[in-house]
């Protein structure tokens, strides 16, 4: 007698990050489904996972995560599970021996070139003189050079991008460097979204509440391969890399990874090490891209401070899909395979191979759930 497949769930969710946890929460609370969430890591929260290090400092294991959104719907949804601590991120770039605001703004240009541009119009005119107009903005070099010209591009973007992606900006989609605006004013915030805050007790605590439901079971240190034949389920929600799901049938999709070096420094009296939350290092001569001081982001006051230094890597956990036309083509082939499996829902940054921020993944999970309900793929618990 086959003793396997004795346990049964309505939905198996692979991945306990935003995409998986929110799908589980929706299916359990709105449809009354029994949901099993697995993750091969030993923790929930995916790449947003945070923890207290051996010095008692709240750290983000997979790199600094700063929540920001324009979407009221996303904000309201997450606010069911957390209080917030307002935080506006500021970054300085280490360029030509100075620490200068990035995104580039009027102060950046004034300090770099020893100028006194006083108005937005003057800044606009300064950049217009140097910008190299491009008929079409097809890649990340076009994005920047068309707005600010070669010198600022070389100083702030080229080296950083080549380190982060191991590709020249001219090989990457325009959207990559377009994440960083160019400003004529003196606004030195990294983001200008309406909502900018961190979960008051951290991301992991927020995820504990998202997943805290009698119909949701979470199993960690568990991979899809290990459990697939041992349980029964009607519906699979998959939030891991899509090429891995299909056994890399068409070849691997490229991802970029990072190595994080955490350094703890004494800060008697509760001060900080750096003048701002993060310092970017665009120079090709420095092996890392940025250093983030965790306590700026979390608001924690302590006698020591932990810095996270980011070294880009090819090998390692897949963190970033690589936005290039040829990778999109390859993804499309996997997506077509996915479309042939109606009982599998692919959602999230890795499953959709999209360079998405946290809020965008929350929005994608919420709309994916809504579409499942609309299509009759899942049934709400109470008919309206
Ligand atoms: P993930 O968080 O990657 O979750 C997927 C989970 O699935 C993982 O835990 C993985 O272990 C699990 N899994 C995969 N395959 C399997 C399998 N076969 N079996 C079992 N489990 C599996 N966004 C922002 O908004 N602001 C930021 O400041 C920010 N900073 C970032 C910094 C870095 C360095 C990185 C890498 C990302 C950053 N992001 C930021 C993006 C953010 O991390 C993602 O948008 C978000 O975490 C994606 O959620 P997800 O659920 O799609 O994927
Ligand atoms: N970038 C850059 N110089 C900087 C900051 C960013 O060239 O000082 C480019 C680089 O290609 C980077 C992209 O802009 O990968 C997006 O930056 P962001 O800070 O949004 O990256 P993330 O936080 O997602 O790693």
Image (cartoon, grey):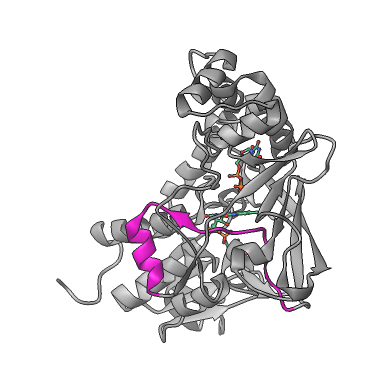
Q: Position of residue 246 (x, y in %)?
A: 58, 51
Q: Is residue 193 left or right of residue 190?
A: left
Q: Quadrant of residue 227?
A: bottom right
| Quarter of the image where the C terminus is located | bottom left
As rendered, which of 6 and 262 lies closer to the eye? 262
Q: Quadrant of residue 355?
A: top right
Q: Is residue 198 left or right of residue 298?
A: left
Numbered disc total: 0
In the rendered image of this protein, does residue 278 appear above or below residue 265? above
- Residue 75: within the magenta? yes
Q: Which residue occupies 63% across, 70% down? A: 50
As rendered, which of 95 and 329 lies closer to the eye? 95
- Residue 373: within the magenta? no
Can you see residue 104? no
Q: Which residue occupies 43% across, 54% down? A: 69
| Quarter of the image where the N terminus is located | bottom right
Q: Is residue 93 left or right of residue 172?
A: right
Can you see residue 58? yes
Q: Position of residue 70 (x, y in %)?
A: 38, 51
In the rendered image of this protein, does residue 276 appear above or below residue 210? above
Q: Position of residue 376 (x, y in %)?
A: 25, 61
Q: Position of residue 318 (x, y in %)?
A: 66, 52
Give, as a single range, the part of the protein colored magenta.
56-80
As rendered, which of 327 and 129 lies closer to the eye? 129
Q: Quadrant of residue 17?
A: bottom right
Q: Residue furthest left?
A: 384
Image-quarter location of ligand 1: bottom right
Q: Is residue 218 left or right of residue 81?
A: right
């Amino acid at each position: 007698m086959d003793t396997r497949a004795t346990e049964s769930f309505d939905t198996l969710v692979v991945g306990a990050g935003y995409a998986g946890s929110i799908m589980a929460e929706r299916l359990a609370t709105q449809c009354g489904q029994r949901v099993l969430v697995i993750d091969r890591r030993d923790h929930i929260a995916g790449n947003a996972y945070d923890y207290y290090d051996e010095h008692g400092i709240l750290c983000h294991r997979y790199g600094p995560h700063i929540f920001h959104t324009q979407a009221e719907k996303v904000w309201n949804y997450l606010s069911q599970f957390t209080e917030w601590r307002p935080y506006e991120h500021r970054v300085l770039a280490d360029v030509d021996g100075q620490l200068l605001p990035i995104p580039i703004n009027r102060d950046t240009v004034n300090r770099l070139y020893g100028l006194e541009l006083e108005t937005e119009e003057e800044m606009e005119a300064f950049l217009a003189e140097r910008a190299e107009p491009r008929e079409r903005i097809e890649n990340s070099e076009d994005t920047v050079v068309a707005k600010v010209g070669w010198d600022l591009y070389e100083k702030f973007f080229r080296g950083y991008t080549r380190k982060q992606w191991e590709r020249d900006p001219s090989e990457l989609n325009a959207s990559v460097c377009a994440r960083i605006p160019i400003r004529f004013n003196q606004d030195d915030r990294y983001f200008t979204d309406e909502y900018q805050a961190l979960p008051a007790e951290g991301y992991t605590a927020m995820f504990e509440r998202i997943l805290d439901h009698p119909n949701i079971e979470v199993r960690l240190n568990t991979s899809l391969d290990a459990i697939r034949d041992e349980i029964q389920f009607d519906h699979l929600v998959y939030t891991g890399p899509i090429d891995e799901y299909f056994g890399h049938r068409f070849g691997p999709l490229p991802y970029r990874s990072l190595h994080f070096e955490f350094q703890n420094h004494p800060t008697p009296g509760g001060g900080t090490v750096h003048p701002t939350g993060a310092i970017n290092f665009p120079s090709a001569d420095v092996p890392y891209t940025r250093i983030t001081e965790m306590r700026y982001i979390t608001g924690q006051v302590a006698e020591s401070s932990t810095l996270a230094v980011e070294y880009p890597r090819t090998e390692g956990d897949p963190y970033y899909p690589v936005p290039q036309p040829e990778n999109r083509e390859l993804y499309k082939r996997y997506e077509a395979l996915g479309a042939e499996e109606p009982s599998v829902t692919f959602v999230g940054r890795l499953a959709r191979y999209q360079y998405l921020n946290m809020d965008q993944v929350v929005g994608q999970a919420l709309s994916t759930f809504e579409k499942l309900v609309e299509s009759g793929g899942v049934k709400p618990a109470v008919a309206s």
